[in-house]
Image (cartoon, rainbow, N blue to C red):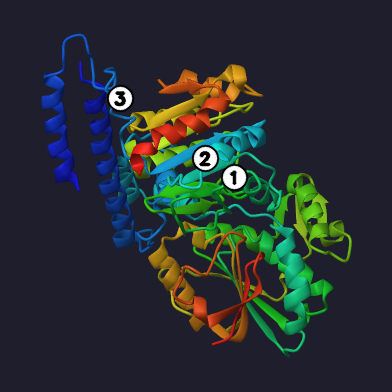
Amino acid sequence: MSAPHRQQTTDNRQRGASLPPGIRSWSDGRVLPEVKRHYELIVIGCSMGGMHALQTILSVLPKEFCVPIAVVQHRYRTSNEGLPAYFRRHSHLNIVDTTDKEWIKPGTVYLAPANYHLLVERGELSLSVDDAVAYSRPSIDVLFESAADAYASSVVGIVLTGSNADGARGAARIKSRGGFMIVQDPATAESPSMPQAAIDATRVDRILPLDRIGPFLVELCRSNA
Amino acid sequence: MPNDNTAILDEQTKADLEHIEIGLLTEGIYRHYGFDFRDYSLPSLRRRIWKRVYAEGLSTISGLLEKVLHDPQSMERLLLDLSINTTAMFRDPTFYLAFRQKVVPLLRTYPFVRIWHAGCSTGEEVYSMAILLQEEGLYDRCRIYATDINEAVLQKAKSGIFPLSTMQENTSNYITAGGHGTFSDYYTARYDYAIFRPSLRENVVFAQHNLVTDASFNHFNVIFCRNVLIYFNNALQDRVQELFLQSMEMFGILGLGRKESIKFTTVADNYEVVDADEKLFRRTR
């Protein structure tokens, strides 16, 4: 594994050296290499107001949308299986309440089960009952950090409405591993503090009003086809 | 000034190094102490290791390796971090309700019932099962073998003393789980603790057992292993499920955590479903 990475480092440094004057880095250029990248996983975190926000996004994703999506929506410990059924009514995609070691399949939305953390490994999902992180289990940070560790630059992270700061650390990890970060415009969020915390924690790629996020994902992942 | 891509590649190098260091740490612990975390599920293992790195005032996993090899006390602390699973009395109450309704009638037909609670942690769910069996009039012919890798949590489990602050939640779980009596009858409150009736552990044997390295030690009519296998990777889950199968009487009952499954393991064909949502299975071959 390490040899190809080392090779890539050299390549990029050489390319970096020949950047046109005035452009500090490739991501500053309008080339937008990140937009053309092949994305393998989308992770979404939301809390207060999240049901509506998620529904808004999931309902515009078409049946052919094949990038898998893992979602942490803060919910009560004892809440039952009602959440997947709810989203199924509003989405063309396959919605599942995640089981431990489930394979990550295209066209599927994986919801974190109540009272478990949802973590990402390459190709599969796992669960834990470790202590709450940022007062939450499931925790958005846990999902995002593990996704960044497993998928590095091929992750898209999205922080939506919520009234705490869960997801901010995770957003920073996704950015540091080269992933793409979208945050809901706090002005359009039912509860603005969570998206604001993510914006404050790292340099996010896009701050979008809620109704633009779904269409943007469709565009962003079109090159995957 | 390095551009962003260089910074990201440095992050990739760091991630590769971390992978190597986790491998070295688990190998070192295995060779020196015999605890085998090599096939633990990586994302949770990584989080728990880093938590201990920072708690010890260190900055790298290699630093932690050096410390735990030369300082057995720091190994004890790491062992607690890596092996404790949070639990509660009647955790997932509907599981206990399903057990009462669907499994207890089967157990009534047996003269004697051996139950293995694998990975019992601090014992809350062992006491829950003892209460349930007492209420169903089955406890006298049951023996519960409650095992865990970690001696420290077993001591807690043996004491039967739990924080009083958790009793409100425990009581509500007990009621949802179909409890017949009054939950507070099962314990005595002393200061901030609830001391559970010693009669509940009369037929319980607490013993250290390592699911990863130890063999089968008896045959059982019921095996519980809830929210432990989620910490293992696929290969290790298969191995432990084989161990359960070897230890399971024909028509014995396997109870897993709510979001665990046997369908991804090699023993899937040996069981039929008793309750799909509550993850209760019955050995049929």
Q: Are marks 2 and 1 on the same chain?
A: yes
| Chain of the residue displaying label 3 | A
Q: Quadrant of residue A174?
A: top left
Question: What's the residue at 16%, 29% (across, down)?
Answer: A12
* Amino acid type, residue under disc 2 in the picture: Leu
Neighbours of disc 3 within 10 Å: few (<14), some (14-19), many (20+): few
**Element at label 2:** loop
Q: Do labels 2 and 1 touch, CB within 8 Å?
A: yes
Name the residue tied to disc 2.
A61
Tell whether A155 sits left or right of B264: left
Name the residue tied to disc 1.
A91
Give the image location of residue A162, x and y in percent. Answer: 62, 28
Q: Give the alpha-carbon distance from disc 1 to disc 3, as whole Å.
A: 30 Å
Q: Is residue B73 visible?
A: no
Foreground residue among B253 and A208? A208
* Amino acid type, residue under disc 3 in the picture: Leu
Q: Which mark is residue A32?
A: 3
Instruction: Give the label, 2 or 3, closer to the camera.
Output: 2
Tell whether B94 sits left or right of A120: right
Q: Do labels 2 and 3 touch, CB within 8 Å?
A: no
Q: Earlier in the sequence, mark 2 or mark 3?
A: 3
Tell whether A140 sits left or right of B90: left
**Element at label 1:** loop
Neighbours of disc 2 within 10 Å: few (<14), some (14-19), many (20+): some
Question: What's the residue at 70%, 60% (across, down)?
Answer: B160
Give the image location of residue A137, x and y in percent. Answer: 60, 43
In the rendered view, tell whether residue A124 sits above or below residue B96: above
Q: Which mark is residue B84?
A: none
User: Which residue lies most toward the right here?
Assistant: B181
Q: Quadrant of residue B158?
A: bottom right
Q: Give the alpha-carbon distance from disc 2 to disc 1, as whole Å.
A: 7 Å
| Chain of the residue displaying label 1 | A
